[in-house]
Image (cartoon, rainbow, N blue to C red):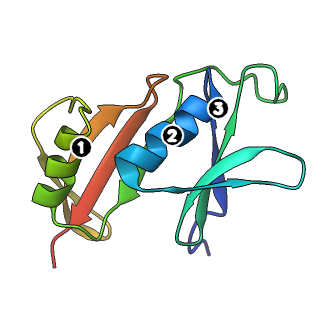
Amino acid sequence: MISRFNHIVLTVSDVEQSVAFYQRALHMVPGVLEDGQRFISFGTQSIYLQTLGQEMRHHPLEGAGNICLVSDWALEEVVEHLTSENIKLLAEPTTKTTPQGVMQSVYFNDLDNNLVEVAVYHQ
């Protein structure tokens, strides 16, 4: 039924700082929607960024997000890159079995304490 996500939304304290962080940390591409809302993307997936008060229907809070992104890099390359960007990993890489197979992940927080997981699936 569902094959991919169109977009997710993260509530952040400073949109421009968040755009810069995700560009630096994960090589995401920044963009602007017609209405001026900022987003970052990778492939055909997008993460829209908003500040408190922009979206009142669901009462979002800063730092309430938890996203898992799949990388086509080797996990060692991901760790090396994040370390070179002074991004603190929350723990050593973990291995778990998911419906899509076995993956290894690293976790870190973005500037607003949203939890970001970067996963690599075993071939």
| Residue beneath disc 3 | 15
If the image is split into quadrants, where does the N terminus sit? bottom right
Task: Name the residue type under label 2.
Answer: Ala
Q: Secondary structure at mark 2?
A: helix
The percent position of residue 31, horizontal first and vertical second, equals 68, 55
Identify the residue under disc 2. 20
* Mark number, residue 69: none
Q: Which residue is mark 1?
A: 82
Tally the marks.
3
Please rate how many residues cluster around mark 3, counting C-alpha atoms within 10 Å: few if below 14, some from 14 to 19, many from 20.
Answer: some
Residue at 24% over, 43% down: 82
Q: Is residue 67 left or right of residue 99?
A: right
The earlier-in-sequence mark between 1 and 2 is 2
Would you identify the image quadrant in which residue 64 lies?
A: top right
Q: CA distance from mark 1 to mark 3?
A: 21 Å
Q: Is residue 38 above or below residue 74?
A: above
**Three-letter code, disc 3:** Val
Residue 17 percent location from the top left of the image: 55, 30
